[in-house]
Image (spheres, grey):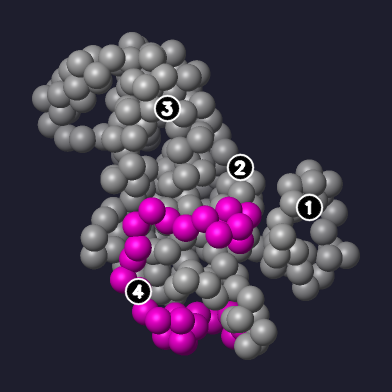
Amino acid sequence: MILWGKISHFSVFMVLQLLASYNKSGLLEIEDNEERSTIYLNQGLVEAVSVPRSDHLLGAKLVKAGHLSQSDLRKIILTSVLRDNKREFLGLTLMKSGMVDPEIIAQTITEQAYENTLELSNWVDGTFKFVVPRHPVVFPFSPQINVQHLLLETSRRLDEGQRPSKSKVGPPGNELCESCSANCADSQKDKYLKDGICLWRNMPVIVREAIFSPDKLRSADVVDHMHDIPFL
């Protein structure tokens, strides 16, 4: 284990940006009293975001799209568990099976990464740890999602009113603010603290800097992605 901490002190998105800035490779494991999630990183890029309750949706999407039958899906999962004596990320298991085009799986994993990152936005209690496994997790076909773009899209969805599918029992707004080091003004709290989710806390650092120092923002690529974000 390389890095460990409490989500209440360092948000999941804050830690993810830190690891990406140093081009780290490994597993960012997040755990609260109810669930455990894993973000797979390779050279600072996100390869997958696994949230247990949504992992089964990956298989369901492929079955619904006609890329895989329900019986084949069950066989793949059962064979993997019996062979490895553990349950790994379903996307990786499907890639290893060779029964579905890796590019199709990668596209589905990419779409689900955005959905699952939104699911993590209300995780405000629990712990995180970053580990580098002895045997690196290798995706045969990697989506490689830029962290800033991933978080910009999540911020946009949150601002438009989208919320995680499962509510989390977290501290009320005032307690959440007390454990945060941002020292936001009341106007910021009124604008960004909604439904127990702090949009400011989950906002990519580059967006915060743009709000306070727009002249420092030089990347046209990032600017293009930010034009459609209402809270700017």
Mark 1 against mark 3, which lies toward the viewer? 1
Q: Looking at the picture, how far across and down is residue 160, in whole percent?
A: 61, 57
Residue 19 painted magenta: no
* Mark sitting earlier along the chain (4/2): 2
Give the class, few, some or many, for how many residues have Cα within 10 Å of label 1's Cα (few <14, many ≥20). few
* Mark sitting earlier along the chain (1/3): 3
- Identify the magenta region: 156-184
In space, the residues marked 4 and 3 are separated at their CA atoms by 34 Å
Q: Secondary structure at mark 2?
A: loop
In space, the residues marked 4 and 2 are separated at their CA atoms by 29 Å
Q: Is residue 154 left or right of residue 54?
A: right
Observer-nearest of 153 and 84: 153
Which amino acid does the dot numbered 1 rest on? Answer: His
Is residue 158 positioned above or below 72 on the image? below
Q: Which labelled disc corresponds to residue 76? A: none
In space, the residues marked 3 and 2 are separated at their CA atoms by 16 Å
State the residue position of label 1. 227
Give the class, few, some or many, for how many residues have Cα within 10 Å of label 4's Cα (few <14, many ≥20). some
- The residue depicted at 63 percent of the width and 55 percent of the height is 156
- Circles 2 and 1, Cβ within 8 Å, touching? The answer is no
Q: Looking at the picture, how far across and down is residue 45, in whole percent?
A: 55, 41
From where the camera sits, is residue 33 visible?
yes
State the residue position of label 3. 139
In space, the residues marked 1 and 3 are separated at their CA atoms by 33 Å
- Circles 3 and 2, Cβ within 8 Å, touching? The answer is no
Quarter of the figure with residue 17: bottom right
Mark 4 against mark 2, which lies toward the viewer? 4
Which amino acid does the dot numbered 3 rest on? Answer: Phe
Residue 174 painted magenta: yes
Mark 2 against mark 1, which lies toward the viewer? 1
State the residue position of label 4. 170
* Mark sitting earlier along the chain (2/1): 2
